[in-house]
Amino acid sequence: MFGWIPLTHLALDTSNGKVFGFSENGGSVQCLHADLSSLVKLTSELGALLKSFVPTEDDDEDYERRAAAVEHIRMEVAERDELPFHGDSIWPEVMEEIAAGMWS
């Protein structure tokens, strides 16, 4: 195990490089990323967005700006690896929460 996303632990399969996630409460194991570079790309881009985003007085405008930035990140990552956005992956929910301003 090498990481943690809310309610999800991450593990790397060293035989094929895939990144898997599983609930801290048990449950099924899910393949979240085709390789470690995909995880690094997604988390570094989201981290940079959170760090650089400057809110305004207009919550609607802030949502639109964050949502556009999150969508751009999703498209960039999906070009290389679509796994983070399929099935029961935690990433769509995390990205929607970031767009909504729940993470800072």
Image: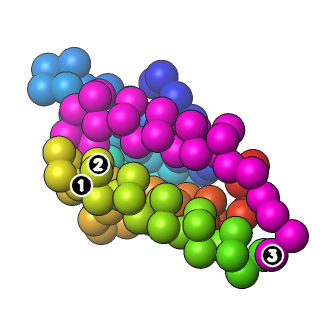
Along the horizontal axis of the image, is 33 left or right of 45?
Answer: left
Q: Residue at x 48, y 60 (%)?
A: 70
Along the horizontal axis of the image, is 82 left or right of 63?
Answer: left
Along the horizontal axis of the image, is 33 left or right of 24?
Answer: left
Characterize the magenta stretch by its predominant secondary structure.
helix
Disc 2 vs disc 3: which is toward the camera? 3
Q: Which mark is residue 15?
A: none
Mark 1 sits on what residue?
78
Q: Is residue 103 visible?
A: yes
Label 1 close to label 2 by CB (< 8 Å): yes
Q: Tell me how far mark 3 sits from mark 1, CA to CA.
A: 30 Å
Location of residue 40 with respect to 75 vertically, above or below: above
Q: Residue at x 19, y 40 (%)?
A: 34
Mark 2 sits on what residue?
77
**Residues in magenta, as a range:** 33-58
**How far across and how far down the image is residue 43, in percent?**
47, 38
Residue type at the position of mark 2 = Val
Q: Residue at x 14, y 20 (%)?
A: 15
Q: Earlier in the sequence, mark 2 or mark 3?
A: 3
Secondary structure state at the residue bearing disc 1? helix
- Quick check: is 40 in the magenta stretch? yes
